Amino acid sequence: MIALHPLVEAPGAPHVVFLHGLEGDAFASWGPRERPGMFQARLSAAHPGCATTTIGYPASVARFKSDPAFTLAPIEAAFGAALDGLLAERPAVVVVGYCLGGLLAALALRARAARGRLPPTLLFLMDAPLLLPERDDPYPEIGAGLGLTVSDMADLTLWLRGEAGTAGIRVVSILSEAPGWLAPYGRDAASPPAPLHVVPGDHLALAAAPDTGDFAPLAVVSGAIDAFLAEVFLADQAGHRNQR
């Protein structure tokens, strides 16, 4: 159901995990067409001490539209089952969820937090659909195909704004400035949890990092990871001092 692709293996180090979006791919979603995986490569170069894994999962628009039995639930369950291995013996975990991948990550982390304590976790929601589509939805069957209700989505958003923090999960929301392809999915800036970053470009370009240059989404992610890991390191140092 899902495929894990380790890019950088570093046992015992913080782990950065990538989840692509609708119609996406574990590599093609994360770079320009001629350089798939560039977002991952540039982020890994900026954080050489971290392990990095990108994940592929079924995300076909055609399948969500045509197969009533195909919902997000089995994909979430498969990712949730993989989380134990991804989180094992890690001082911190970063999950970069683009589009549908952000929703999938949030659902799986909530389920995992309910089962036991998580390491400090940073979750990026990059144009994640936290609202079910209503008017002008270009793909109305997808909303139904996810197998989620309006109430489910509202509960998840409330959890991200509140209980996620008590579970050790920090959430950063990134929205593309131009609505683009999936405009109706959570376009209002009030719906994502704070802190919220609105970056130039449209939805389809949000994860397509170029080879070089100051790419705004990458800068937001990298800067937040730096701050997050610095806090985790300081907290760990303080904990060791208190144990002496």
Image (cartoon, grey):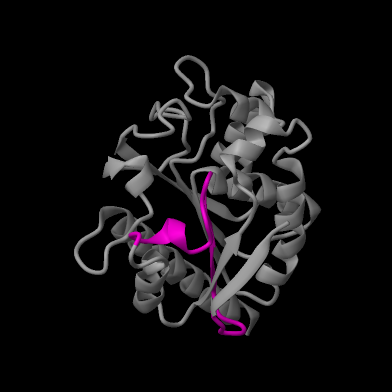
Q: Position of residue 117 (x, y in %)?
A: 72, 60
User: Is 72 colored magenta in this rendering?
Assistant: no
Q: Is residue 84 left or right of residue 121?
A: right
Q: Position of residue 145 (x, y in %)?
A: 68, 31
Residue appearing at x 26%, y 54% in the figure: 216
Q: Quadrant of residue 36?
A: bottom left
Q: Which of 43/227 is in front?
A: 43
| Figure check: 149 above or below 44 | above
**Is there any visible trace of residue 118 in the rendered image?**
yes
Q: Quadrant of residue 4?
A: bottom right
Q: Main secondary structure of the magenta part?
A: loop
Q: Which of 105/195 is in front?
A: 105
Q: Is residue 222 left or right of residue 71?
A: left
Point out the image quarter for the C terminus.
bottom right
Residue appearing at x 67%, y 69% in the figure: 87
Q: Which residues are magenta?
A: 8-33
Residue appearing at x 61%, y 84% in the figure: 11
Q: Position of residue 112 (x, y in %)?
A: 73, 54
Q: Quadrant of residue 219?
A: bottom left
Q: Is residue 110 left or right of residue 74?
A: left
Q: Position of residue 37 (x, y in %)?
A: 42, 67
User: Is 31 colored magenta in this rendering?
Assistant: yes
Q: Which of 229/93 is in front?
A: 93
Point out the image quarter for the N terminus.
bottom right
